Image (cartoon, rainbow, N blue to C red):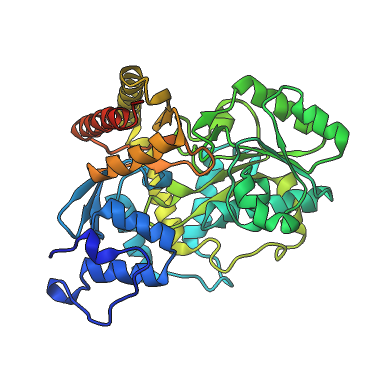
C-alpha cells in the first residue's frame, strides 16, 4: 500500500474509482478521501496528518496500529482508554451481552443495568448516593442532573467555575466556560454564572440571586488539567448547602482513578449530591456515563419517571462493559501506583530540561500536563509527537496545554519510549521556535 499525504489533500472529494486493500477492504487513501468529502474537514485534516496516510486498523493496550504499518503509543484518546485498548475482561463481557440480549425492551428490567446501578452506589456512598441515571456520554449525565436540580428547586440559575468544560449539548454548554463555543448559541443558553477561584465566590453569587446547583470538576480536564484547591472546594460546598443548592461533582474525566481516587470529590469530603462518571466507565469499549445521586436531587424522577428519559439509557451491552471496567479498578491497583509515579517523574524531568518551551509540568495520578509557553509551541508539539509515534490530547479551553494520559496498562518500556519521544519533540520545538 502506498498511501501518501499527496493522495489526501484537504477538502478533496471521494474518488469514484475504488482501490481496495487485500481481503476486499477499502484502501486507506480511499477512506481518507471519503472522510474529507463527507465528515468535518478540519478534523479529517488532523486525522490525515497524524496518521501520515494511514487509518486505524487494530489496537491493544497502549498501542494503536495503522494501515500503513505504523504503531502509535496512545497517551491521548481524551481519557477514554484508562484500561488500554480492548481490555479482555471488558470485551468478553460485551460479547456475552451481545450473544444473549444486546438491547433492552425497556419495559422489563435488564440485569446488566440493575447490577451496574448497584455497583456504582456501593462504590461511592451507599447510604447517601442511592439513585443512578445512566447515559452514554458525559453530556448526557450533565444534562440529566441539570434538569433534576432545576426541577427540584424551581430555580433556573446554576453556578459553574471559570475554566470549566462540561460538554457541548445546550445545557452542558451553558455550564462550559468557553466564550468561543458559547457565542453562537448565546440566546439559547440559560442562566449560568462562572465563578472566579475566590473563597467567597459562592456566597456572593447567592446574594445576587438564588441558584439551583453548583457544578465543579475537582480536576478540570479541558481547562488544562488544573486541580481546584481542596480548601476552596470545601468552602464552596458548605456555602452551596447553606444556600439550599445542590453540589454536583463532574468527574467524567478525572474520576475512576484517573486522578487517584475513584471519586476525587468523595476523597476530599465534599459530600456532593451527585457524582458524574463517563469516558472510561465503559472500559474504553462502549459509550457509557452515569449520574449517581442523592434521593433529594433525584426526587423529580421519583415523582415523574418520564421527566427525563433516553432511548439508550442503561444500554445492556454498555452496562456489561461498565461492570467489567469497575472490576479492573482493583485488579490494576499496583499499576495505578506504578504508572502514576513514572508519569510524575517523567513530566517533572521534561519541564526541568525544557524551560524554553514548557512553562509548567504537573501530574495528578495518571493525568499529566505539559503547559507550553504559547499556543503555537503546543500545536507544533502535538503534531511532532504524533509524527514520531505518540498521541497526546490537546485541551479545547486551554490551548497552551497538552494532556499526557497513559493507560494503566502502559509498560515501563512504553513509558520510557513516550518520554524519549517527548524529549526529542520538546528539543525540536525549542530549536524551531528560538528567536533569531
Q: Residue at x 30, y 29 (%)?
A: 426
In the picture provided, is 272 more to the left or to the right than 432? Answer: right
Which residue is found at the position 57% from the left and 69% from the top?
311
Q: Is residue 257 visible?
A: no
Query: Which percent across, then down, holds residue 114?
Result: 53, 57
The part of the image, by quadrant, that contains residue 249 is: top right
Q: Quadrant of the C terminus?
A: top left
Visible residue check, residue 111: yes
Left or right for 72, reference 157? left
Judged from this view, the residue extending furthest toward the top is 352
Q: Quadrant of the N terminus?
A: bottom left
Q: Is residue 138 left or right of residue 56?
A: right
What residue is shown at x 39% (from left), y 32% (from top)?
Answer: 366
Viewer-proximal residue among 386 and 77? 386
Q: Position of residue 333 (x, y in %)?
A: 35, 31
- At x 57% / y 45%, what residue is drawn? 276
Taking depth in this image into account, of 307 and 167 the one nearest to the observer is 167
- Count the numbered circles shown: 0
Name the one closer to the observer, 235 or 305: 235
Residue sticking out furthest to the front:
436
Q: At which x and y percent is residue 325?
A: 39, 47
Q: Is 87 above or below relative to 372?
A: below
| Residue, far bottom | 16
Above or below, 109 against 410 in this view is below
From the top left corner, tell me how far across and down residue 234 is, in percent: 67, 24
Image quadrant assignment for residue 159 = top right
Amino acid at each position: 500500500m502506498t498511501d501518501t499525504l499527496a493522495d489526501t489533500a484537504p477538502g478533496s472529494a471521494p474518488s469514484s474509482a475504488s482501490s481496495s486493500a487485500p481481503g476486499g477492504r477499502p484502501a486507506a487513501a480511499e477512506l481518507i478521501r471519503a472522510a474529507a468529502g463527507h465528515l468535518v474537514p478540519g478534523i479529517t485534516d488532523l486525522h490525515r496528518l497524524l496518521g501520515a496516510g494511514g487509518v486505524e486498523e487494530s489496537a491493544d493496550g497502549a498501542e494503536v496500529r495503522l494501515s500503513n504499518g505504523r504503531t502509535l503509543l496512545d497517551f491521548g484518546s481524551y481519557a477514554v482508554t484508562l484500561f488500554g485498548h480492548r481490555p479482555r475482561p471488558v470485551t468478553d463481557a460485551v460479547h456475552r451481552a451481545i450473544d444473549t440480549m444486546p438491547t433492552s425492551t425497556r419495559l422489563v428490567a435488564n440485569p446488566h443495568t440493575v447490577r451496574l446501578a448497584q455497583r456504582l452506589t456501593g462504590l461511592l456512598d451507599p447510604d447517601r448516593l442511592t439513585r443512578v441515571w445512566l447515559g452514554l456520554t458525559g453530556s448526557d449525565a450533565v444534562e440529566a442532573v441539570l434538569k433534576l436540580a432545576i426541577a427540584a428547586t424551581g430555580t433556573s440559575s446554576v453556578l459553574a467555575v471559570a475554566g470549566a468544560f462540561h460538554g457541548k449539548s445546550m445545557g452542558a454548554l451553558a455550564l462550559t466556560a468557553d466564550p468561543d463555543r458559547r457565542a453562537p448559541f448565546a440566546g439559547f443558553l440559560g442562566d449560568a454564572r462562572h465563578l472566579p477561584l475566590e473563597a467567597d465566590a459562592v456566597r456572593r453569587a447567592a446574594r445576587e440571586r438564588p441558584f439551583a446547583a453548583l457544578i465543579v470538576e475537582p480536576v478540570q480536564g479541558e481547562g488544562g488539567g488544573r486541580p481546584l484547591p481542596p480548601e476552596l472546594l470545601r468552602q464552596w460546598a458548605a456555602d452551596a448547602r447553606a444556600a439550599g443548592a445542590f453540589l454536583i461533582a463532574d468527574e467524567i474525566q478525572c474520576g475512576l482513578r484517573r486522578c487517584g481516587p475513584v471519586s476525587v470529590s468523595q476523597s476530599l469530603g465534599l459530600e456532593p449530591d451527585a457524582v458524574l462518571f463517563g469516558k472510561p466507565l465503559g472500559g474504553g469499549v462502549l459509550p457509557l456515563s452515569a449520574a449517581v445521586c442523592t434521593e433529594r436531587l433525584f426526587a423529580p424522577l421519583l415523582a415523574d419517571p418520564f421527566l427525563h428519559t433516553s432511548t439508550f439509557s442503561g444500554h445492556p451491552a454498555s452496562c456489561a462493559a461498565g461492570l467489567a471496567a469497575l472490576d479492573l479498578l482493583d485488579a490494576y491497583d499496583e499499576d495505578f501506583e506504578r504508572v502514576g509515579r513514572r508519569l510524575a517523574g517523567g513530566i517533572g524531568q521534561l519541564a526541568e530540561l525544557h524551560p524554553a518551551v514548557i512553562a509548567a509540568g504537573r501530574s495528578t495520578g495518571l493525568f499529566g500536563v505539559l503547559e507550553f509557553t504559547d499556543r503555537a509551541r503546543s500545536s507544533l508539539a502535538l503534531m511532532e509527537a504524533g509524527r514520531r509515534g505518540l498521541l497526546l490530547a490537546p485541551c479545547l479551553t486551554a490551548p497552551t496545554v497538552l494532556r499526557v494520559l497513559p493507560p494503566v496498562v502502559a509498560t515501563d518500556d512504553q513509558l520510557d519510549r513516550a518520554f524519549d519521544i517527548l524529549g526529542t519533540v520538546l528539543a525540536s520545538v525549542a530549536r524551531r521556535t528560538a528567536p533569531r
